[in-house]
Image (cartoon, rainbow, N blue to C red):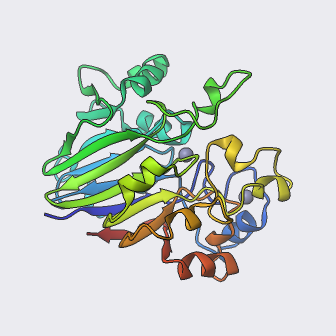
């Protein structure tokens, strides 16, 4: 048994370039000088025929067009068996609206994330008579495609931006932000596109894994502030940064993980520039910078 993963989109919400952004990366991407990246999503399969998609990004239509494995195999037969949500963020759920058209699949999420989706009537476009909504309890495996199970576990994070109140807890641990443990036979891989903190529990869980896709939103915590693009730090957005003593590169250094791949990069992240020092540093620490269309099999 093996796990085949295809990065449908490697960028965080907004994508690269982001429609209203004139930062250096976005300008380079518009000029075709660095590769553009669509918004965060991963397709996974154990047998190469039946697929699950982890998070449905607003770019899903173009992402599916670019992925031959996911093309229809008949008039209305498709290889997509399910969509799994890791949180309720717009960049992870908006693509569900593209997946209407009376096409059966199963939508998996925690009960808490299902409630967020259910509260928004526009998602009834995915008719319950066609799309089955199945809640997965934390730490209980569910078979999301033949031969492939997913176990959701809580990771530190926050509620979606559109549900934030006056006070926001950015390292909440519960059903609102989860990581995914994928298993096919004895092979294990992880998908964690949003994570505020790598605590000891999470480090112990990931230690020795064959493959981890991890939150690469920002290179440094104050990256967006320094770029003049806003007041929010990575911590405030619920994302650990890559660099620095509190960053993910340092936190992963001694975890003995065979393949470490950053995904969910914000368009300001310098690792999105192939020749940058920051990318060289991440690669020297054993990381791969994910990009659209990249496939990893373990
Ligand atoms: Zn996101
Ligand atoms: Zn930008």
Residue 192 visible in image: no
Image-based side of 190 in relation to 166, left or right: left
Q: Nearer the viewer, residue 280 or 15?
A: 280
User: What residue is rendered at 66% in x and 26% in y?
Assistant: 164
Q: How many marks?
A: 0
Where does the image place residue 196, in percent across and percent down from the top left? 58, 46
Where does the image place residue 286, in percent across and percent down from the top left? 48, 77
Q: Nearer the viewer, residue 210 or 279?
A: 210
Where does the image place residue 174, in percent across and percent down from the top left? 46, 30
* Above or below, comparing residue 53 to residue 285 in the picture: above
User: What residue is rendered at 53% in x and 47% in y?
Assistant: 195
Residue 183 position by quadrant: bottom left
Where does the image place residue 81, in percent across and percent down from the top left? 22, 43
* Above or below, comparing residue 120 to residue 74 in the picture: above
Q: Nearer the viewer, residue 73 or 84?
A: 84
Image-based side of 28 in relation to 9, left or right: right
Q: Nearer the viewer, residue 248 or 89?
A: 248
Residue 292 visible in image: yes
Image-based side of 194 in relation to 213, left or right: right
Q: Quadrant of the C terminus?
A: bottom left
Q: Quadrant of the N terminus?
A: bottom left
User: What residue is rendered at 23% in x and 56% in y?
Assistant: 45
């Amino acid at each position: 048994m093996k796990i085949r993963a295809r990065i449908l989109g490697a960028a965080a919400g907004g994508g690269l370039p982001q429609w209203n952004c004139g930062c250096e990366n976005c300008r380079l991407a518009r000029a075709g000088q660095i590769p553009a990246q669509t918004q965060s999503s991963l397709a996974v399969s154990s047998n190469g025929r039946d697929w699950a998609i982890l998070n449905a990004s607003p770019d899903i239509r173009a992402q599916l067009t670019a992925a031959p494995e996911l093309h229809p195999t008949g008039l209305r037969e498709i290889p997509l068996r399910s969509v799994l949500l890791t949180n309720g963020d717009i960049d992870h759920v908006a693509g569900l609206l593209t997946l209407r058209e009376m096409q059966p699949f199963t939508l998996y999420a925690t009960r808490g994330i299902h409630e967020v989706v259910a509260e928004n009537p526009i998602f009834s476009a995915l008719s319950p008579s066609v799309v089955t909504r199945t809640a997965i309890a934390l730490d209980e495996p569910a078979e999301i495609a033949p031969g492939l199970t997913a176990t959701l576990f809580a990771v530190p994070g926050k509620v979606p931006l559109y549900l934030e109140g006056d006070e926001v807890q950015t390292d909440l641990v519960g059903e609102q932000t989860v990581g995914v443990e994928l298993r096919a036979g004895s092979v294990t891989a992880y998908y964690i596109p949003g994570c505020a903190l790598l605590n000891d529990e999470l480090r112990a869980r990931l230690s020795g894994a064959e493959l981890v896709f991890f939150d690469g939103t920002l290179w440094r915590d104050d990256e967006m502030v320094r770029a003049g693009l806003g007041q929010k730090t990575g911590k405030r957005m619920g994302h650990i940064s890559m660099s620095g003593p509190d960053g993910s590169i340092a936190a992963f250094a001694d975890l003995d993980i065979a393949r470490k791949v950053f995904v969910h990069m914000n368009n300001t992240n310098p690792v999105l520039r192939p020749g940058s020092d920051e990318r060289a540093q991440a690669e020297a620490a054993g990381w791969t910078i994910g990009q659209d269309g990249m496939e990893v099999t373990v």
